[in-house]
Amino acid sequence: MGRSFSRLAALVICVVVGALAGGSTVVAKVGPAKPDKKAVPGDLIVRFAAGVSDDERREMLRSIGAKETGKADRLRLRFAHVDPDAVLDAIKRLEDDSRVAYAEPNFVLTADGIPADPSFAQLWGLNNTGQAVNGTTGTPTRTSTRSRRGT
């Protein structure tokens, strides 16, 4: 018991000294915050393995009661919608098929903050707060965009 107490005391001393020295010493790593796992109810993103035909993809989605809502062919992705209560079962059934690389809910992603990129301020479209661009302030609306095009 004396030996383990000595080790614990040494660890506590190291932590205290590190904190007093400016706190720059990392003693323990804390994992990242758990991401918000909100998803669009009933929406799925499915990536198929290479070589799976469009007919096979459509049939697989049909077999789980999904309706295809979009696609990204270069990525072999299909976007689909199922009953929101059936999402987990649909994912399990799809992932049990070797022709599916992965299936997942359509998670809602949000930015946590503004990037530390020194040129970010020059990218006005990524941080559009209504500032002046080419002498015009504010953000265009659909109405004003259409009116400028003459439609």
Image (cartoon, rainbow, N blue to C red):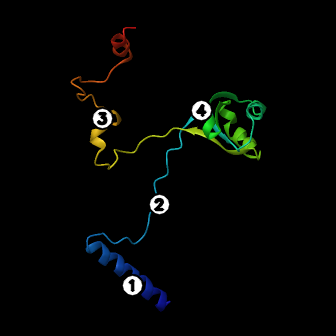
Q: Quadrant of residue 100?
A: top right
Q: Give neighbour class at mark 4: few <14, some 14-19, many 20+ (Cα, 10 Å).
A: some
Q: Residue 128: percent from the left, percent from the top?
A: 31, 32
Q: Secondary structure at mark 4?
A: strand
Q: Mark 4 or mark 3, which is nearer the start of the sequence?
A: 4
The mark found on residue 124 in the picture is 3
Residue 47 vertical position relative to residue 3 in the rendered view, above or below: above
Viewport quadrant of the C terminus: top left
Q: Quadrant of residue 10?
A: bottom left
Q: Mark 4 or mark 2, which is nearer the start of the sequence?
A: 2
Residue 33 vertical position relative to residue 54 in the rendered view, above or below: below
Q: Nearer the viewer, mark 1 or mark 2?
A: 2
From mark 1 to mark 2, how far is it between C-alphas?
Answer: 25 Å
Q: Give neighbour class at mark 3: few <14, some 14-19, many 20+ (Cα, 10 Å).
A: few
Residue drawn where x is 26% and y is 70% of the image? 22
Residue type at mark 1 is Ala
Residue drawn where x is 71% and y is 30% of the image? 66
The residue at which mark 4 appears reads as: 41
The residue at which mark 2 appears reads as: 31
Query: Circles 1 and 2: CB distance less than 8 Å?
Result: no
Q: Secondary structure at mark 3?
A: helix
Q: Give neighbour class at mark 1: few <14, some 14-19, many 20+ (Cα, 10 Å).
A: few
User: In the drawing, does residue 114 fall left or right of residue 96?
Assistant: left
From mark 3 to mark 1, how far is it between C-alphas?
Answer: 52 Å
